[in-house]
Image (cartoon, helix red, strand yellow):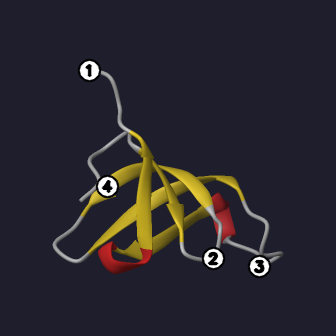
Amino acid sequence: MAEVKDQIRSNKGIVGIVEKVYESSVIIKILKNPTGIFFENNVTVINHKNYEVIHKAAF
């Protein structure tokens, strides 16, 4: 499961930084969006089952 400030990639290829972690999902600030789907404020919610952590945050 991702933590705040981790970088993740969704199953659809959206890459972003985790801003908030919930019980079954995360909210991310989108960095790369190859889908062409518009996300207001460049933010979206992704279920824990639908992403992989690609870079852990260094604290």
Q: Nearer the viewer, mark 3 or mark 2?
A: 2
Q: Which residue type does callout 1 highlight?
A: Phe
Marks 4 and 2 in Cβ contact (< 8 Å): no
Q: Residues within 10 Å of mark 3 (few under 14, many from 20)?
A: few
Q: Position of residue 38 (x, y in %)?
A: 76, 75
Identify the residue at horizontal 33%, vertical 79% (top origin). 49
Q: Residues within 10 Å of mark 4 (few under 14, many from 20)?
A: some
* Mark before the other along the chain sequence, 1 or 2: 2
Q: Considering the numbered disc 2 on the image, is that residue within a helix, a strand or a loop?
A: loop
Marks 3 and 2 in Cβ contact (< 8 Å): no
- Give 22 or 13, whichever is nearer the viewer: 13
* Mark before the other along the chain sequence, 4 or 1: 4
The residue pinned by badge 3 equals 37
Q: Is residue 32 left or right of residue 45?
A: right
Q: Position of residue 7 (x, y in %)?
A: 47, 45
Q: Which mark is residue 59?
A: 1
Q: Which mark is residue 20?
A: 4
- Give 55 or 4, whichever is nearer the viewer: 55
The residue pinned by badge 2 equals 12
* Mark before the other along the chain sequence, 3 or 2: 2
